[in-house]
Amino acid sequence: MRLMTKLGLKTWLASCLIAAGGAAHAQLNVLVTGVGSTQFPIATANFANETATPQPISKIVRDDLARSGKFNNIDVGNTTVSETDSVDLGGWKAKGADAFVAGSVTPLANGEYQIRFKLYDTVKQQNLGGLELTTPASGLRMTAHKVADYIYDKLLGTRGVFATRLSYVVRSGNRYLLQVSDSDGQDVHVALSSPEPIISPVWSPDGTRVAYVSFEKKKPIVYVHDLPTGRRVIISDQKGNNSAPAWSPDGRTLAVALSRTGNTQIFAVNADGTGLRRLSQSTSIDTEPAYSPDGQSIYFTSDRGGQPQIYRMPAQGESAGAAQRVTFSGSYNTSPRVSPDGKTLAYISRVGGAFKLYELDLASGVATALTDTIHDESPSFAANGQYILYATQVNGRGVLAAVSTDGRTRQILSVPGGSVREPSWGPFMQ
């Protein structure tokens, strides 16, 4: 969301209402473009007995791997191979696969399903291990994502994020829907439906709660929503605007932007709504806080230098140390989000009237544009730091997009016939 001026919130909401169509509750469609500089060729056979299950496990795995841009799926045709079968690894290597996956799905008497699989290196002729997972029918998609995560980790040495979740806001008729889905936009659940706007959702570090701003009481109020129970707690209902919640890494504190003192400033509040204290101390507009992964710093947007730029201050506030400017390339930079390893900053920069997603190497100060769209906003890192989710527009319609941090792979996630925005990529699930 753009820098919060006194009139900025109303202006942004007006544009949101114009852009948002009457999208019905629907799954996100995913369009992938571009691939990595190199792709790992892999063959995932159809799992034995999977036709008897509600979900095609092997297809979900193949789709996940393709979506990452880092794998090339070798066609397996109608081949079905169980993890207990003898595998001709040399034959699959001859077909171009450097890795091979075999597995099975077994229905259990209690209505659950057991998924087993093995991953093989066809080049070294080695068994790379596998998993045995048990799940109810409702968890089959997520279990398939866990299989893909295992493969991603074993072959690329980095934890996968297929089994993480997304949150975002869809306008459906005259209502706003805060939706939660799998990372591929499927298995959608509505966390909140409201006749008034919902903005700025952000996941708690443990993935069980989402903080957001709701206008259901005709003013912006910050809530924390417990997803398993649906219970909600008001975290900040101060005089004026309450906006831009951000979780501390330990989940005990949220930073928020409040206009209770006149100009918007950064405050901290405990996750139960107690202990409000002011952090920024300027006479300008300070907003859009984001904690560093180590919890020692808060990045935020401020116009204290005349134009919106990104600054960093101690997590205890400016009373513990003066804020330092971080962005120097470009005259208008907002919406900071720090990568999980703390080395990279994603942000939105206005360039010639266009709003574009950038990433900044915090050590070198080198800034790089990642997109070719012009209405980017709300960046959010994937838990493994290899992708950034953001909102943008395509053909005048609000969509979500994801781009790899090397800029090579892009995804567009859209709701048929409607607009979607305010994305947040959830953490690794425990």
Image (cartoon, rainbow, N blue to C red):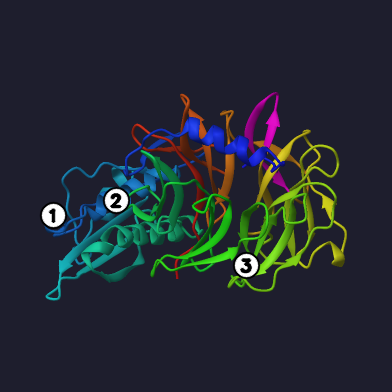
Q: Crowding at label 2, few (<14), some or many (≥20) Cα neighbours within 10 Å?
A: many
**Of 224 and 410, which appears nearest the observer?**
224
Q: CA distance from mark 1 to mark 3?
A: 42 Å
> Residue 356 in magenta?
yes
Q: Crowding at label 1, few (<14), some or many (≥20) Cα neighbours within 10 Å?
A: few
Residue 60: image tag: 2
Q: Is the C terminus in the top left, top right, bottom left or bottom right quadrant?
A: bottom left
Please give the residue where the numbered disc 3 appears in the rendered image. Answer: 249
Please give the residue where the numbered disc 1 appears in the rendered image. Answer: 51
Q: SS for tag 3?
A: loop
Looking at the image, is mark 2 or mark 3 earlier in the sequence?
2
Looking at the image, is mark 2 or mark 1 earlier in the sequence?
1
Q: Residue at x 45, y 34 (%)?
A: 20
Q: Which residues are magenta?
A: 349-361
Q: Position of residue 312 (x, y in %)?
A: 78, 55
Looking at the image, is mark 1 or mark 3 earlier in the sequence?
1
Q: CA distance from mark 2 to mark 3?
A: 31 Å
Tell me: residue 75, above or below residue 100. Answer: above
